[in-house]
Image (cartoon, rainbow, N blue to C red):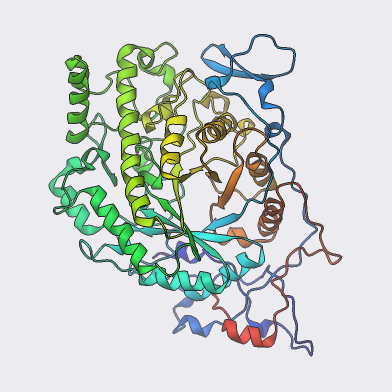
């Protein structure tokens, strides 16, 4: 672990920095002038126990009032989509006679603004490469702070590459067991991600956790086990769905390997499921999302707002495409993917396939996109069926994550969504089939980019995160499936939180059943950032309608009055 990974938890103060007082009850400020100690500074110290301190809370300015943006609570039925130069122009008003509703959706107002619990994602390296809990004393202090802020719980990745790294069916859950016990001690809940993908190579990846070594060994023998693009570039993030049912992992299929992993987790944490561990998010692709790795950032392969590339060139995917083409008497269509779909960094209009009147809207284009997106749906269906069979009756919810691919959303073809496997265009709703598949298994639909506003995006990228969220809210409502949300990028400002508040409401489509904040790190606990989070959690817990008043001293959060006895019990969380 490098020095950058030390800066994951809130700064703590030593008890010795406070004057002794006769008053046994103290309210301690969070903000500290004490900086984190990095690797170079700790060389002269023997153990973390040399540094003792308690978590502290800052004297803060009265909180700004978070207000949800009005754009999400306006009457959505007053919106109309106008086809103009390949873009969607949204206008509002009662007097417009000609209406074409985007994807044929209608909008309703059910006025449901109930409590939305907030979870916080833990650092990606919460568990070390050795399988132990990373910096347990600092984690203990951080969880105590989050509990005091009113957070419902935390989310952690259960990395396949860590737990089953020693060999097939050899699982090590010990670090996660320590975390579960610590979470329970603080009265928090836990969401656990079955992370069957690698960590590293995508937005926000701060560490590297590859797939299990024995899996990588099989991939080295058979490179077609991973997704491949048209130029032959292999992507080791996740095993290709093309071999889901092939016994390519030392006699097991990938689906069997995922199922065995989930069963092992269930048996190890049976006593906590439904009580402390309230949700299992089932990883189904890169970044844990049900999608193809169409826009990999590693080695500069892709950058925003590139269209990405189709990932259907491993031998298993090619065999499936060939069979699908032969089945409809179009053998030539199965020889390869689209030849005119461009490269990762291109824009739609620079390609023959994705341009306004491109190949995507031809008979061939429709065949290919139905096959490509259909394979992804089948993959999700197989894994969620296995997860449902594994966790049924445990009391834990199941969820799946869908990527918020908002760039080029205002164009006809929605190119970036298509290469990722979401067959969503100006004329076709690509999220309803996914929502219906989730609904079939009783799985919560978890969606990203809840914090983004259209006005923040560059014009040339034709983004519309707000339009995308509205569409997903309606799709999940139609499919009668719960909708939960995440922010796609790190945000600490009041504006980002206000946008989440707006999207959490059910003024149009589904309201959010839960929100998971990305991510716990040092910056989150800094003065204004922490104040914004606390106020956000408070507001979400009150249905997004009420804003808390600050107390007469200008502070809006206390850890509680910590007695000397309680400080002893905490063992004075270690300064890192």
Relative vertical location of residue 457 with respect to residue 529 in this rendering, above or below = above
Say which quarter of the image contains residue 463.
Answer: top right
- Residue 379 at x, y percent in the picture: 31, 39
From this view, report whether residue 466 is shown above or below residue 80: below
Left or right, 364 with reference to 437: left
What percent of the width, then of the height, locates residue 46?
44, 84
Count of labels in the image = 0
Residue found farthest to the front: 393
Q: Which residue lies furthest to the bottom in this view?
A: 22
Q: Who is closer to the viewer here, 97 or 355?
A: 97
Residue 116, how many percent across, how many down? 63, 51
**Residue 139 seen in this snapshot:** no
- Left or right: where 137 falls relative to 342: right
Residue sitting at 35 percent across and 38 percent down? 293
Which residue: 46% across, 62% down? 4
Q: In which quarter of the image is residue 302?
A: top left
Rendered residue at 68%/82% (across/down): 17
Q: In which quarter of the image is the N terminus?
A: bottom left
State whether residue 312 appears in this view: yes
Across and down, in percent, residue 450 comes to 58, 41
Instruction: Judge whether 308 appears above or below 287 on screen.
Output: above
Q: Which of 554 and 564 is in front in this view?
A: 564
């Amino acid at each position: 672990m490098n020095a950058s990974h030390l800066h994951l938890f809130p700064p703590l103060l030593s008890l010795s920095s406070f004057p002794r007082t006769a008053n046994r009850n103290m309210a301690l400020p969070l903000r500290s002038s004490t900086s984190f100690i990095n690797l170079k500074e700790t060389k002269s110290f023997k153990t973390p126990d040399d540094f003792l301190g308690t978590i502290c809370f800052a004297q803060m300015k009265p909180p700004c009032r978070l207000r949800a943006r009005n754009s999400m609570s306006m009457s959505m039925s007053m919106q109309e989509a106008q086809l103009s130069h390949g873009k969607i122009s949204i206008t509002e008003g009662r007097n417009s006679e000609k209406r074409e509703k985007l994807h044929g959706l209608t909008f309703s107002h059910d006025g449901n603004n109930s409590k939305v619990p907030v979870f916080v994602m833990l650092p990606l390296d919460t568990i070390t490469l050795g399988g132990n809990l990373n910096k347990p004393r600092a984690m203990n202090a951080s969880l105590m702070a989050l509990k005091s802020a009113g957070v419902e719980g935390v989310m952690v990745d259960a990395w396949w590459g860590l737990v089953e790294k020693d060999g097939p069916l050899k699982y090590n859950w010990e670090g996660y067991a320590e975390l579960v016990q610590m979470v329970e001690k603080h009265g928090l809940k836990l969401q656990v991600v079955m992370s069957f993908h690698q960590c590293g190579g995508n937005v926000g990846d701060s560490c590297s956790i590859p797939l299990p070594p024995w899996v990588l060994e099989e991939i080295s023998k058979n490179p077609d086990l991973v997704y491949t693009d048209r130029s032959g570039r292999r992507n080791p993030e996740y095993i290709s769905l093309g071999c889901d049912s092939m016994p390519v992992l030392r006699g097991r299929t990938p689906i069997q390997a995922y199922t065995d992993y989930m069963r092992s987790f269930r048996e190890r944490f049976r006593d906590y499921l439904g009580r402390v561990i309230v949700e299992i998010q089932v990883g189904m692709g890169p970044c844990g999302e049900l999608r193809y790795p169409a826009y990999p950032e590693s080695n500069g392969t892709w950058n925003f707002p590139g269209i990405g590339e189709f990932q259907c060139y491993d031998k298993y995917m090619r065999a499936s495409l060939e069979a699908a083409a032969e089945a409809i008497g179009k053998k030539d269509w199965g020889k390869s993917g689209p030849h005119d779909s461009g490269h990762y960094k291109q824009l739609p209009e620079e390609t023959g396939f994705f341009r306004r009147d491109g190949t995507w809207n031809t008979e061939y284009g429709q065949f290919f996109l139905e096959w490509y997106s259909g394979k992804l749906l089948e993959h999700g269906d197989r894994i969620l069926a296995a997860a449902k069979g594994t966790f049924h009756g445990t009391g834990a919810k199941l969820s799946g994550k869908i990527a918020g691919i908002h760039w080029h959303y205002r164009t006809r073809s929605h190119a970036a969504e298509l290469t990722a496997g979401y067959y969503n265009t100006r004329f076709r709703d690509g999220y309803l089939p996914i929502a219906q598949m989730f609904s079939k298994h009783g799985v919560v639909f978890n969606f990203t980019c809840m914090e983004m506003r259209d006005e923040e995006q560059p014009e040339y990228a034709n983004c519309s995160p707000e339009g995308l969220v509205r569409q997903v809210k309606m799709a999940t409502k139609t499919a009668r499936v719960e909708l939960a949300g995440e922010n796609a990028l790190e945000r600490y400002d009041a504006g980002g939180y206000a946008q989440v508040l707006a999207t959490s409401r059910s003024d149009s489509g589904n309201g959010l059943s839960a929100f998971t904040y990305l991510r716990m790190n040092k910056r989150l606990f800094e003065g204004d950032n922490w104040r914004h989070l606390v106020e956000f959690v408070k507001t979400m817990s009150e249905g997004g309608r009420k804003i808390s008043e600050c107390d007469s001293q200008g502070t809006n959060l206390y850890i509680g009055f910590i007695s000397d006895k309680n400080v002893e019990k905490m063992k004075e969380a270690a300064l890192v």
